[in-house]
């Protein structure tokens, strides 16, 4: 089967999805429309939501059709049997209708809820055209089913086995990134940013390194104990560099996205594949998908430091827990296994 994958390249999920389908013998062409935009277009679009609706509407009448023209061009070049879309990829409803008119099936893999993202006004409408929707949050699933949207699956094709084969850090890298606990994340100027800084501050008394953008600086004023642990990053860290940094750490805290109400953050799966133990902020769906294994959970921020100390100080316990999680996620959440089941339902 020929598959067209529409997804950004700055997440690890695109590589996980592509690897999963290819391991089943399918041909995957990955298209990220951002590569075909000029820098000023990308930068301007990030700021467009701050402008009045009239100006934003004029911009979108120019911006979105250009992107969708390229989507259709790539579609016609590859003639896929299945189009797999991460979130909405700036698609217009008529573009998805065009795909379906050419007998392609449509699968959405949701990372953001249409109720909590302003990236595309048509996102929710697009989901009504899906042949299959894979999403990471049982609460989102209930919301969509209430609207009459069908073919919804809550699952996590999150384990990328290629990450486990990545090279080990050199002696110099281990010395440079010699931190027991690493946390890397985007800061936000609103309450999400406060929550993330509050989360990271729970580990300020440990051998911790926090890397983030300038929006962290606003909230660090409230958590002065975290300031010495924080390093401002002006440019995006390469995926290869981030893997090495994580492999040098003993534990990696995974905070929950406030818009994911019951679901599991996919960063947890990357940590397990890379060989760093995740300390995971609790969400309800963990009780369903990880009830068979001992996943370190943060159910109260006040307990976070103690949980981290427990696994940092005990190498045997940490390695045993990580191996159990590795074996479980490799079998349960490998994308070829998850998508293999989903394709049978299409």
Image: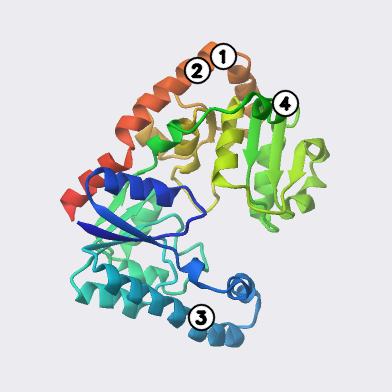
Q: Nearer the viewer, mark 4 or mark 3?
A: 3
Image coordinates for residue 292, horizontal then vertical, percent: 35, 25
Give yes or no for contact between labels 1 and 2 (Cβ–Cβ under 8 Å). yes
* SS assignment at label 3: helix
Assess disc 2: are there few (<14), some (14-19) or many (≥20) residues with their C-alpha within 10 Å of its C-alpha: some
Above-or-below relation of 268 to 152: above
Image coordinates for residue 133, horizontal then vertical, percent: 30, 57
Above-or-below relation of 307 to 329: above
Give yes or no for contact between labels 3 and 2 (Cβ–Cβ under 8 Å). no
Q: What whole-number distance in Å separates the C-alpha atoms at marks 4 and 2?
A: 19 Å
Residue drawn at 41 percent across, 48 percent down: 15
Q: Is residue 135 left or right of residue 341?
A: right
Q: In terms of image quadrants, where is residue 98?
A: bottom left
> Which of disc 3 and disc 4 is earlier in sequence?
3
Assess disc 3: are there few (<14), some (14-19) or many (≥20) residues with their C-alpha within 10 Å of its C-alpha: some
Q: What whole-number distance in Å separates the C-alpha atoms at marks 1 and 4?
A: 15 Å
Residue drawn at 27 percent across, 59 percent down: 3
Mark 2 = which residue?
319
Q: What numbered label is drawn on residue 315?
A: 1
Is residue 234 visible in the rendered image? The answer is: yes
Q: Is residue 97 left or right of residue 212?
A: left
Image coordinates for residue 44, horizontal then vertical, percent: 63, 75
* SS assignment at label 2: helix
Mark 3 = which residue?
63
Mark 4 = which residue?
207
Residue drawn at 34 percent across, 37 percent down: 333
């Amino acid at each position: 089967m020929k598959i067209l994958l529409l997804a950004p390249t700055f997440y690890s999920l695109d590589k996980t999805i592509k690897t999963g389908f290819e391991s089943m013998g399918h041909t995957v062409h990955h298209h990220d429309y951002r590569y075909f935009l000029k820098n000023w277009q990308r930068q301007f679009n990030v700021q467009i939501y701050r402008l009045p609706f009239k100006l934003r509407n004029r911009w979108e009448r120019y911006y979105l059709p250009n992107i969708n023209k390229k989507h259709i061009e790539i579609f016609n070049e590859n003639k896929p049997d299945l189009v797999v879309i991460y979130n909405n990829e700036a698609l217009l409803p008529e573009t998805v209708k065009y795909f379906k008119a050419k007998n392609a099936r449509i699968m959405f893999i949701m990372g953001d809820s249409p109720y909590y993202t302003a990236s595309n006004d048509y996102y929710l409408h697009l989901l009504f055209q899906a042949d299959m929707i894979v999403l990471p949050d049982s609460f989102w699933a209930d919301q969509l089913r209430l609207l009459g949207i069908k073919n919804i699956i809550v699952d996590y094709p999150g384990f990328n086995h290629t990450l486990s084969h990545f090279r080990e850090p050199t002696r110099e890298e281990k010395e440079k990134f010699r931190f027991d606990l690493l946390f890397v994340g985007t800061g936000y100027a609103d309450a999400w940013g406060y929550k993330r800084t509050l989360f990271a501050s729970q580990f300020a008394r440990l051998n911790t390194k926090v890397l983030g953008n300038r929006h962290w600086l606003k909230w660090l004023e409230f958590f002065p104990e975290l300031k010495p642990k924080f390093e401002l990053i002006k440019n995006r860290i390469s995926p290869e560099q981030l893997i090495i940094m994580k492999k040098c750490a003993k534990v990696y805290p995974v905070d929950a996205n406030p818009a994911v109400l019951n679901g599991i953050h996919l960063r947890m799966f990357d940590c397990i594949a890379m060989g760093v133990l995740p300390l995971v902020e609790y969400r309800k769906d963990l009780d369903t998908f990880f009830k068979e294994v001992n996943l370190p959970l943060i159910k109260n921020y006040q307990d976070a430091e103690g949980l981290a100390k427990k696994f940092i100080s005990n190498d045997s316990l940490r390695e045993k827990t990580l191996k159990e999680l590795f074996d479980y996620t490799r079998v349960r959440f490998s994308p070829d296994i998850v998508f293999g089941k989903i394709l049978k339902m299409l």
